[in-house]
Image (spheres, rainbow, N blue to C red):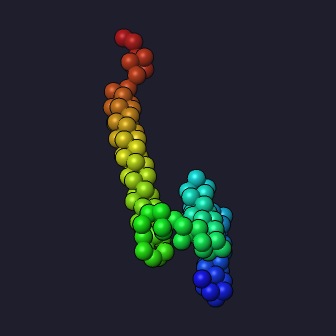
Amino acid sequence: MTLLQKLFGILTVLTIFWIIIQLVKKGKLREEYSWLWLLTGLILIIVVLWYDLLLIISKLIGAVYPTTTLFIFGIVFLILLSLHFAIKISHLTYEVKNLAQKISFLEAENEQGDPGDKPVS
C-alpha cells in the first residue's frame, strides 16, 4: 500500500469519526449505536496501518485479493447490522401494540366513569 493510499484511508476514517461525534452531539445518533461505528473506524485504521494483517486474513479465508476480503467483511457487517435493526424493529412493534392496547383500555375505563362518582339517591 502506498503512502498516498494510507494517508487517504486515515483521512477518510478520521472524517468518519468527526461526523459520528457531531451526530451524537446533535442528538441525531444515539450513543448506543455510535460505539459500533467508532469500532468499525478503528478496525479500518488498523487495516490501513497494518496492511499485512489484511493479507494474512485474505490467505486464511482463501481470497485472492485483499479487496475481496474487505468486500466480504463489509457485506457480513451489513447483514449483521440489518439483523440487529430487524430485532429492534420487532421489539418496538411489540411495544407499540402493547401501548395501543393499554391506551384503549384506559380510554374505555375513562368513558365508563368511576362507579364512586355517581350521586346516591
Residue 97 in the image, given as x and y percentages of width and height: 34, 41
Residue appearing at x 42%, y 17% in the figure: 116
Question: Number of labelled discs?
Answer: 0
The C terminus, quarter of image: top left
| 25 relative position to 121: left or right | right
Q: Nearer the viewer, residue 33 or 107?
A: 33
Rendered image quadrant of residue 4: bottom right
Residue 90 in the image, given as x and y percentages of width and height: 37, 46
Q: Nearer the viewer, residue 93 or 118?
A: 93
Residue appearing at x 57%, y 64% in the figure: 40
Q: Is residue 73 above or below residue 2?
A: above
The N terminus, quarter of image: bottom right
Residue appearing at x 37%, y 37% in the figure: 98
| 50 relative position to 112: left or right | right
Q: Is residue 23 visible?
A: no
Q: Nearer the viewer, residue 14 or 64?
A: 64
Q: Is residue 91 above or below residue 75?
A: above
Residue 66 in the image, given as x and y percentages of width and height: 49, 74
Q: Nearer the viewer, residue 95 or 107?
A: 95
Rendered image quadrant of residue 72: bottom left
Residue appearing at x 43%, y 52% in the figure: 84
Q: Is residue 90 above or below residue 14?
A: above
Residue 47 in the image, given as x and y percentages of width and height: 60, 70
| 33 relative position to 101: left or right | right
| 65 relative position to 5: left or right | left
Q: Is residue 56 visible?
A: yes
